[in-house]
Image (cartoon, rainbow, N blue to C red):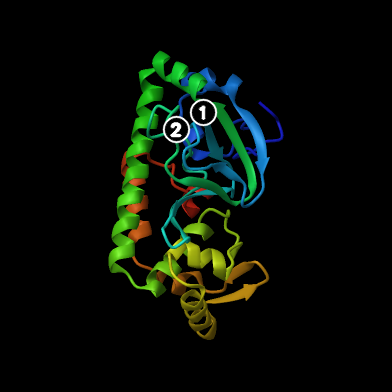
């Protein structure tokens, strides 16, 4: 495995991906020789709909990937973000199936990847390894369920705050989130003008500022207070099913 891949702590040779760090030493040893490091730029497409899913990608550090569903009006709607708490591509299924959504790199940075064949062979050798990925599949499904409910019942303001908080949690305490108005509109599935109005409201209240290509959060507590509780519901489920995997300030400092 390429030594350039970020690690979670000094002296720890595992990639800075919480799901991989959740594995016991024996299980990680089964897949470690087959992990390859890569740097992926923002907007890199990992899978198009219909592509054969042959590789699993693990975001590391602040890297983020997203699932986008195309609509008949030509707009893409992002359903969930996946960061260092998980992986994309062939996780829920056994792989080698066509991708249903477009999977794209949202925030560029380090990833590690492994072929579906290598991962399946390792899971066949270890029930505990298979169990961890089965548990993660459950957590990912919970994210999808929560996202569906959120889009149906919460306001654009609540969802805007939720997405910014969700992205901020994965940037290692950096309050500068690399999201544009256009990207936020895609996350929310609304027109750019709606997002811009909400952002202007938050700016007038001193909650955040905008910079070229990014949003600077000035008052994280106020932003969280304006968000719905969907992030918290997902984090609570992760904590119950895969303790310590979902990025939090406590986990980052431990």
Q: How many dots with numbers?
A: 2
Residue tagged 1: 54
Question: Residue 79 at x, y = what percent?
Answer: 41, 54
Q: Does residue 108 appear to the left or right of 65 in the view shown?
A: right
Give the mark nearest the N terminus, 1 or 2.
Answer: 1
* As drawn, 9 above or below 149: above
Q: Which residue is mark 2?
A: 90
**Is 43 or 37 nearer to us in this picture?**
43
Across and down, in percent, residue 157 comes to 41, 74
Quarter the N terminus occupies: top right
Q: Nearest the camera: 246 or 91?
A: 91
Q: Residue at x 36, y 50 (%)?
A: 143
Q: Residue at x 39, y 31 (%)?
A: 133
Residue 126 x/y as whole percent: 40, 17
Quarter assignment of residue 60: top right
**Label 1, label 2: how many angstroms apart (C-alpha)?**
7 Å
Q: Name above or below for residue 184 compared with residue 132.
A: below
**Crowd band around label 2 with a 10 angstrom C-alpha radius: few (<14), some (14–19), many (20+):** many
114 left or right of 223 in image: right
């Amino acid at each position: 495995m390429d030594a350039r891949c970020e690690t979670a702590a000094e002296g720890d040779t595992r990639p800075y991906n919480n799901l991989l760090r959740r594995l016991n030493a024996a299980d990680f040893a089964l897949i470690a020789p087959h992990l390859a490091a890569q740097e992926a730029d923002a907007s890199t497409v990992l899978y198009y709909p219909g592509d054969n899913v042959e590789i699993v990608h693990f975001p590391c550090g602040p890297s983020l990937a997203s699932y986008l569903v195309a609509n008949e009006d030509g707009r893409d709607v992002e359903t969930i973000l996946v960061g260092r708490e998980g992986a994309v591509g062939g996780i829920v299924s056994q792989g080698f199936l066509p991708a249903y959504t477009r999977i794209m790199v949202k925030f560029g940075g380090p990833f590690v990847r492994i072929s579906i064949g290598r991962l399946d062979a390792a899971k066949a050798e270890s029930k505990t390894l298979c169990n961890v990925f089965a548990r993660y599949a459950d957590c990912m499904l919970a994210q999808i369920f929560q996202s569906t409910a959120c889009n149906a019942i919460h306001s654009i303001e609540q969802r805007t705050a939720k997405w910014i908080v969700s992205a901020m949690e994965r940037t290692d305490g950096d309050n500068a989130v690399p999201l544009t108005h256009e990207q936020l509109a895609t996350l929310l599935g609304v027109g750019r003008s709606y997002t811009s109005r909400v952002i202007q409201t938050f700016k007038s209240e001193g909650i955040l500022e905008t910079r070229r290509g990014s949003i600077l959060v000035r008052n994280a507590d106020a932003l969280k207070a304006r968000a719905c509780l969907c992030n918290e519901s997902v984090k609570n489920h992760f904590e119950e099913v895969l303790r310590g995997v979902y990025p939090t300030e406590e986990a980052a400092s431990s």
